[in-house]
Image (cartoon, coloured by chain):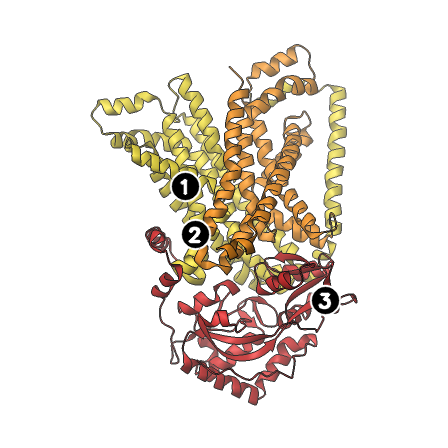
Amino acid sequence: MSAQNVLFDHPGPSARQRNTIITVVGWLALLGLLGALAWGFRAEFTSAKLSPFLEAGTWQFYILPGLLATLQSAAISVVTSIVLGLLLGCGRLSPVRAVSNVCGVLVEVFRAIPVLLMMILWYYIGLYVLVLGREGSPLLGVVMGLTLYNASVIAELVRSGVHSLPRGQGEAGLAIGMTPGQVLTSIQLPQALTAMLPSLISQLVVILKDTALGSAILYVDLLKQLQDLATYRGNIIPAFVLGAIMYILLNSALTAVAHQVQRRLSRSQRGPRPGNPERAVEAAAVGVVAGRGADAD
Amino acid sequence: MITAKKLAGLAAAALVALPLSACVNQQAAETGGEPAGEGGGEGVTIGIKFDQPGLGLREGDTYTGFDVEVAKYVANELGYSEDQIEFVESPSAQRETLLSSGQVDMIFATYSITDTRKEQVSFAGPYIIAGQDLLIRADDTSITGPDSLSGKTLCSVTGSTPAEKVKEEYPEVELQEYPGYSQCVQALSTGGVDAVTTDNTILAGFAAQEQYAGQLKVVGQTFSEERYGVGIPKGDVDLCNQINDALTSMVDSGAWQTALDETLGASDFQVDTSVNPPEFDTCS
Amino acid sequence: MAEMLERADFLAAFWMTLRLAVLGTVGALLLGMVVAIMRVSPFTSLQFFARTYVTLIRNSPLTLILFFCVFGLQNSLGMRVGDDLSTQNLFWGVVAISVYHASFIAEALRSGVNTIPLGQAEAARAIGLPFGASLRHVIMPQAVRGAVAPVGNVIIALTKNTTVAATVGIAELASRMKTSIEFFPNLLYLIFVLVAVCFVVLTLPTGLFFTWLSRKVAVQR
């Protein structure tokens, strides 16, 4: 059910009036709330606390390096997540029982553990076991924490994508003498990847957003730099507001890209068309499961 | 910064190393980083705090505070000019590993000399003796020391020694832990907590910050002795003696007092002159 | 090891995590339901508010939302609830977790609405039900049933995301884990496994329950 407006009548004169009243009341309530917040925070937005953001040094030594570090950890994690996710996904589809079982267990375990716990573990492994030091350990923590979790989500995307293909695709490949591995890599994966592209891109939003957890293990990302700035200038609230704006802008841009890709894909009808209804239902169910990662974490 | 390729290598190494590393510390000892350079034209890497006004604070690309001034003086005496010094952040939990893996040559970062730490690193100095104290709102007369804290809320940094100490010795105090002292001080200034505890030097630095001028005060009843030493790699007696000589000359020339007045002194902070400037421990 | 267990007090930390998760779930479900209804309501302004809420919250890191609640609302504005610290911490932790996950609950419910065939709404309209009644008697009962699986997934994610509370010093499992490792670095793997198992104990039954529930209440079409 996509068309929302079947739920209610086309507004008549009295409905339109009610609509106007609710709109006015709603906006007044919202503006009142914002006004109360602004009044409450008036001591936090004085010129003394805002002027640091007009200085070049603030951007040069705090905000831009922080932004760069955030993007760097996100970029590395995206690449490693996709690589590991593809490996785990293919492993899970492997006809060899042992391989698919091991990959299945790994995916389940990585998905069950909170990202922050994984980050803390790898941070201390970096610190005590591998001795990567002050730059390496936090980066290792962030990257491994994000990679293991998101790879398991991507593995599920791969599996659901391949399962959503008509069975005939795989059978045809086998019939012309391809090995199961060849069928997977040259027939099923390319189609599955196209289908999962939008979910994959929204997963990137998750990765970018979760890099903010890195500040808890002293990764010098945007959030940590803003905290340092706040220590120096005593402007903790304006600094966090700026941080929120930057994250929202970055993530909205990524989401917009995801929507664009989705629209283009659905227009060109290149996505897999489920062969029989039973498979379609399964695909939808798995899609929902996989979509979880793309959503809440 | 570490490239993606190198990191992938590290990750692979980690996966291999994981099952092997039954003994964490042994592993740490085996895989040391590059050796610490001494003297010469190489430059020196010094670990400081980045987030403690008055002791070690990053202000853009410059660093201020008493630790920083002492570090600069000592490095200068050891033959390094100011532009040969690289300051890096050494958070409390990382200090031992940074030294033992050779990623920093010396640490001046509110680093108290303790027997536990001496098992892993050596210390020169101490160069100042601080003590755990309380920071309260200037108009608060109800708190005069740790004994008058019952029923009050106290803030310190997560997992820090001061926090642990208070938890053990004054269990009736409600303890709030935040990631950094700046959040504690913000909460104190708005009434979220009643007191902040850590070394009096650190507290004095925050009390002296512009935005809190006149609002906060240090109680002045220290209830521990924190002897800030210069952390150096374990067993480097030569370096230890050189640093102690440098510290001696800093105290004798009056530079020590000047540095103290210019950094922590801004908040009318007085060090305990019965123990400061401190006697050095023997290097070992 | 006994010393570590005694010092870390994982039981209290587990209790804190559990409270954050349960109260956060309740808050997120209530708020999410309100936002979802606003989203499908006939009032364009309410639709706009709901859409903006979801867009803004979904794109902000939970860490930042929590920082804003604790350092902004609690400490700067002095909005305090209850007298003792642990109540305040719990309160703002729950608020941040609820506000963040409500946006995902709202989306999950909306996806539940989207699984309902158009004919259902048209039929409701055809027999003369106004918006409120068709929502209450036709759409929402089916939407909630269709949304059980995704809502369950949000709740599992919420449980795991309670760890973010560690960043503002709330004494839950992740913060205990970090402190314990700093004091007992040689027990690194043991501590991790212990805490990880705590989370599996919380999330595994939740996952199984929602899978069972979604099968049980699934709308047959």
Helix, strand, or loop for circle 2?
Answer: helix
- Residue indicated by mark 2: C189
Name the residue at 38% across, 42% down: A82
Question: Which marked residue is nearer to the observer: mark 3 or mark 1?
Answer: 3
Position in image of residue A214 (x %, y %) = 50, 53
Q: Colour of chain A?
A: yellow
Question: Which marked residue is nearer to the observer: mark 1 or mark 2?
Answer: 2
Position in image of residue A143 (x %, y %) = 43, 50
Distance Cα–Cα, label 1 vs label 2: 22 Å
Judging from the image, mark 3 belongs to the subunit labelled: B
- Residue indicated by mark 3: B147
Inspect the image, locate mark 3, and give the three-letter code of the amino acid beneath it. Asp
Name the residue at 66% across, 51% down: C70
> Which sits in the foreground, B149 or C103?
B149
Badge 2 crowding class, 10 Å Cα cut-off, few under 14, some 14 to 19, many 20 or more, is some
Q: Colour of chain C?
A: orange
Position in image of residue B84 (x %, y %) = 44, 76
Name the residue at 29% across, 24% down: A170
- Residue indicated by mark 1: A151
The furthest residue to the front? C2
Badge 1 crowding class, 10 Å Cα cut-off, few under 14, some 14 to 19, many 20 or more, is many
Res. A221 in view: no
Against B19, residue B254 (above or below) is below
Helix, strand, or loop for circle 3?
Answer: helix
Q: Do the residues under discs 3 and 1 have CB atoms within 8 angstroms?
A: no
Res. C157 in view: yes
Helix, strand, or loop for circle 1?
Answer: helix
Distance Cα–Cα, label 3 vs label 1: 53 Å
Q: Colour of chain B?
A: red
Against A199, residue C129 (above or below) is above
